[in-house]
Image (cartoon, helix red, strand yellow):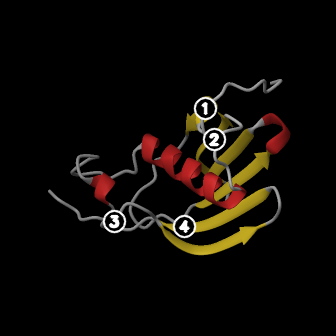
Amino acid sequence: MTLGSIHHPVILFKTLTENRAEFGLRIPRELAYFDGHFPDLPIVPGIVQLHWAVEFAKEVFNISGIVREGRQIKFSNLMRPLDEPCLVLEHVSENSLIIYHYKAGEKTYASGRLIYSSDAKGERVSNGL
């Protein structure tokens, strides 16, 4: 089964402040990542959710470094076609840290903390955590 070339959720809204971003998302039925995950129960793979969090954080917080470590990464509920999660990103620049959550009301789909290098070369930084 080939679902097409859609690789990102639809952005329904975006709210940005200096250290926080919220994206209202809709998961398209035709998402390419549903191919193989799974024929009778399509779900967004956890690695894809993580990838989206990194992509959105790099863009909105102008981060040029690479993610060096993930902590407290949890996948609590399945993300399925037509779900509308809100991706919340918090940037703690002094610790080179991104805190992310995918939520819909009281339901949490996934959450975690991402520590990134302070430069594009991937140099290890002291994060004090």
* Measured Cα–Cα span from mark 3 to mark 4: 14 Å
Is residue 28 or residue 69 the one in the foreground? 69
Q: Which residue is mark 3?
A: 6
Q: Residues within 10 Å of mark 3 (few under 14, many from 20)?
A: few
State the SS at label 1.
loop
Q: Quadrant of residue 81?
A: bottom left
> Mark 4 belongs to which amino acid?
Leu
Q: Residue at x 80, y 24 (%)?
A: 129
Front disc: 2 or 4: 2
Is residue 15 or residue 1 the one in the foreground? 15
Q: Which residue is mark 2?
A: 65
- Looking at the image, can residue 10 be seen? yes
Q: Which residue is mark 1?
A: 122
Image side of residue 9 versus residue 128, left or right = left
Front disc: 3 or 4: 3
Q: Indicate which disc, 1 or 4, sits on the residue closer to the N terminus.
A: 4
The residue lying furthest to the front in this view is: 121
State the SS at label 2.
loop
Q: Residues within 10 Å of mark 4 (few under 14, many from 20)?
A: many
Q: Quadrant of residue 99?
A: top right
Q: Using the image, tell me which numbered label, if any, was put on residue 25.
A: 4
User: Mark 1 touching mark 2, by CB under 8 A?
Assistant: yes
Q: Indicate which disc, 3 or 1, sits on the residue closer to the N terminus.
A: 3
* Measured Cα–Cα span from mark 3 to mark 1: 29 Å
* Measured Cα–Cα span from mark 2 to mark 3: 26 Å
Front disc: 1 or 4: 1
Q: Residue 100 in the image: x percent, y percent?
A: 66, 47
Q: Indicate which disc, 2 or 3, sits on the residue closer to the N terminus.
A: 3
